[in-house]
Amino acid sequence: MNNQRRIVFRSIAVLAVIVAAFLFYRFVFVGSSTEEPAGVVSVTSVSPAAQVDNEFLRLLERLERINLDISVFNHPVWESLENFHQELVSEPRGRRNPFSVTGNDVASTTNSATTSSRGL
């Protein structure tokens, strides 16, 4: 009888350890199915593209409410400003092949030995 009690006690102890290990694993690593895992933020069903569109529309609405005072262009100080712009002149665009060795980019009608820019 003593032997049978030991077997039953060991069986119950092993079963209790297995149940305790399962519960420990369940609560520590898996967690409850109703709670969100740590670090996860719930998101609305609106897609990111729709959020960007909504933000863009809000910014456009704010711009529509802006009123600019154009009377500054009629001010004498504005009218006294002078334009000092300079005309851009056309310049040569560069070599036909910018990756070729310097001196090899001369026209085929001239002698490359006489027009080479390398010093000897």
Image (tube, rainbow, N blue to C red):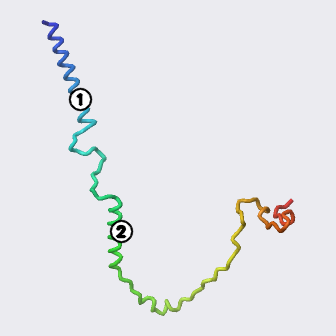
Image coordinates of residue 101 in percent, x first then y, are 76, 59
Image coordinates of residue 36 in percent, x first then y, are 25, 45
Quarter of the rendering containing residue 114: bottom right
Residue 111 versus residue 37 in the image, above or below: below
Residue at 82 percent across and 61 percent down: it is 118
Nearest the viewer among 87 and 50 is 50
Please, which residue is most extreme toward the left here? 1
Q: Secondary structure at mark 1?
A: helix
Image coordinates of residue 96 in percent, x first then y, are 72, 66
Q: Amino acid at mark 1?
A: Phe
Nearest the viewer among 97 and 78 is 97
- Residue behind mark 1: 22
- Residue behind mark 2: 56
Image coordinates of residue 41 in percent, x first then y, are 29, 51
Residue at 45 percent across and 89 percent down: it is 73
Residue at 34 percent across and 59 percent down: it is 48
Name the quadrant of the N terminus.
top left
Q: Amino acid at mark 2?
A: Phe
Instruction: Name the disc covering residue 59, or none.
Output: none
